[in-house]
Amino acid sequence: MSHEHANRKIVNDRLNRIEGQLRGIRKMVEEDRDCFEVLKQVAATSGALRSLGLLILEDHLDGCVNEALGGKESNEELLAQIVDAFKKFSR
């Protein structure tokens, strides 16, 4: 299995887990569960999404950015894209 396909499986597995977490949160709200329990699950789901985003960003830097450095894009445009991506995940 290539690096790209291995990471695709990891991303899909994480997405499935996050979907399950979201369904769980919805059920907790519908069941009027304790707010603190719901908030803990929201925080866990948020962390899982952030982790997934960082994995995808890492793959982007490893693949797309390396390819772009081969002369397909200007370095200024590439750096702007990288900075923008980091800003989105540093909030």
Image: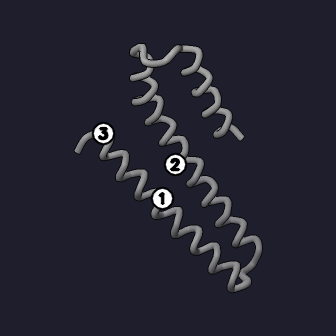
Which image quarter is the N terminus in?
top left
Q: Nearer the viewer, residue 88 or 33?
A: 88
Which image quarter is the C terminus in?
top right
Q: Earlier in the sequence, mark 2 or mark 1?
A: 1
Classify mark 2: helix, strand or loop.
helix
Q: Amino acid at mark 1?
A: Leu
Q: CA distance from mark 2 to mark 1?
A: 8 Å
Q: Label 2 belongs to which residue?
A: 52
Q: Nearer the viewer, residue 44 or 87?
A: 87
Q: CA distance from mark 3 to mark 1?
A: 18 Å
Q: Earlier in the sequence, mark 2 or mark 3?
A: 3
Q: How many marks?
A: 3
Q: Earlier in the sequence, mark 3 or mark 1?
A: 3
Q: Residues within 10 Å of mark 3 (few under 14, many from 20)?
A: few
Q: Label 1 belongs to which residue?
A: 15
Classify mark 3: helix, strand or loop.
helix
Q: Answer left or right for 6 relative to 64.
A: left
Q: Position of residue 4 (x, y in %)?
A: 32, 41
Q: Amino acid at mark 3?
A: His
Q: Label 3 belongs to which residue?
A: 3
Residue displayed at 71% across by 81% down = 33
Residue displayed at 51% across by 69% down = 20
Q: Residues within 10 Å of mark 1 (few under 14, many from 20)?
A: some
Q: Is residue 35 above or below residue 80?
A: below
Residue displayed at 56% across by 54% down = 48
Q: Is residue 81 above or below residue 72?
A: below
Q: Residues within 10 Å of mark 2 (few under 14, many from 20)?
A: some
Q: Position of residue 32 (x, y in %)?
A: 73, 84
